[in-house]
Image (cartoon, coloured by chain):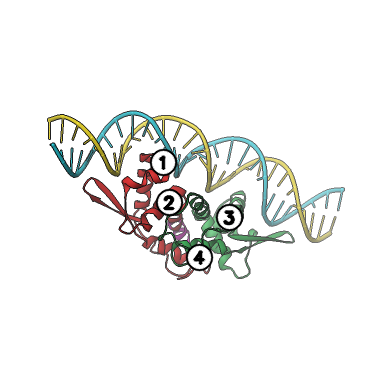
Chain colours: A red, B green, C cyan, D yellow
Amino acid sequence: MNATVETACCPPLTQSALSEPAATRLAEVFAVLADPVRLRLFSLIASAPGGTCACDVVELVNRSQPTVSHHLKVLHEGGLVTRERRGRWIWYQAHPAALADAASLLDCC
Amino acid sequence: MNATVETACCPPLTQSALSEPAATRLAEVFAVLADPVRLRLFSLIASAPGGTCACDVVELVNRSQPTVSHHLKVLHEGGLVTRERRGRWIWYQAHPAALADAASLLDCC
DNA sequence: CTTGTAGATCGATGTTCATCAATATAGACT
DNA sequence: AGTCTATATTGATGAACATCGATCTACAAG
């Protein structure tokens, strides 16, 4: 995956019917966001200036380390976060382009 | 359900960490949108001026009548569409308030 | 009241997914 | 090399969900 929604820009969801492929792709983006743990992880990463170390978020969301690793992978594959290794740790940063695509469909554009 | 996201307005997802209840509620909204059939149904309803009759959309999305009925129920319970009976038929109209709440979290506010 | 039609509900099925324990990998430091 | 720590992967399990056929309900018109 790891892509943005190239079909997302204009017109928004309320102005013309979605094609089946566009609906399928957009639904994948929303599916990434359709989990409370992933939403919290993303907001933690996005709201921290400079990003967040994976080591810090495990305890914040009350899930096991494998579960958090799984959700971070989903966020990364969905293109919502970038990952970078720094020594022993891996730092995540928000990559809001995919979000902006989704948001453009929801209202503005 | 059938509610808007009362906790959604300000600040957006990228500026402060979500609380667990807010994340749970917002994830429910995204889960409603995380299905291609529902996205197409919503865009069909929202893009038709005056709304759409349920009788018209079954064939448009290539699913059985019970499946379409199920998805329309999910959209309605999620507050994304309103329903109104007109004689034998039921008309759906987009109710974009919940969408706007979600969009406000994704970017603007 | 009967018939026909629109839509919802029920029950079953196969699939997807969140979760965790156990294990593996990978880097840093001695 | 060996050890410690951070993260990923594997495998299993239970729950949620999309789907459909069959059936039920609700309304309108004879």
Look at the numbered discs 1 and 3 and tell me whether their residues touch, using CB distance below 8 Å: no
In the rendered view, does A73 fall on the left or right side of B24? Answer: left
Question: What amino acid is labelled 3 in the image?
Answer: Gly
The chain holding disc 3 is B
Q: Which mark is residue B78?
A: 3
Residue B18: where, in percent of width, then height?
45, 54
The answer to whether tags 1 and 2 share a subunit is yes
Q: Residues within 10 Å of mark 1 (few under 14, many from 20)?
A: few
Label 2 close to label 4 by CB (< 8 Å): no
Q: Earlier in the sequence, mark 2 or mark 4?
A: 4
Q: Which residue lies under the disc numbered 2? A: A40
Chain ID for label 2?
A: A
**How far apart in space, not on screen, are marks 1 and 2 (Cα)?**
12 Å
Q: Which residues are magenta?
A: A19-25
Discs 3 and 4 share one subunit? no
Q: Is residue D24 above or below residue A98?
A: above
Q: Quadrant of residue C18?
A: top left
Q: Which structural element holds mark 1?
A: loop
Residue A10 placed where, x, y %? 44, 70
- Say which chain tag 4 marks: A
Residue under label 4, please give it: A13
Inspect the image, locate mark 1, and give the three-letter code of the amino acid beneath it: Arg
Q: Is residue B35 magenta?
A: no
The residue located at (53%, 67%) in the rendering is A14
Q: Is residue A53 above or below residue B14?
A: above
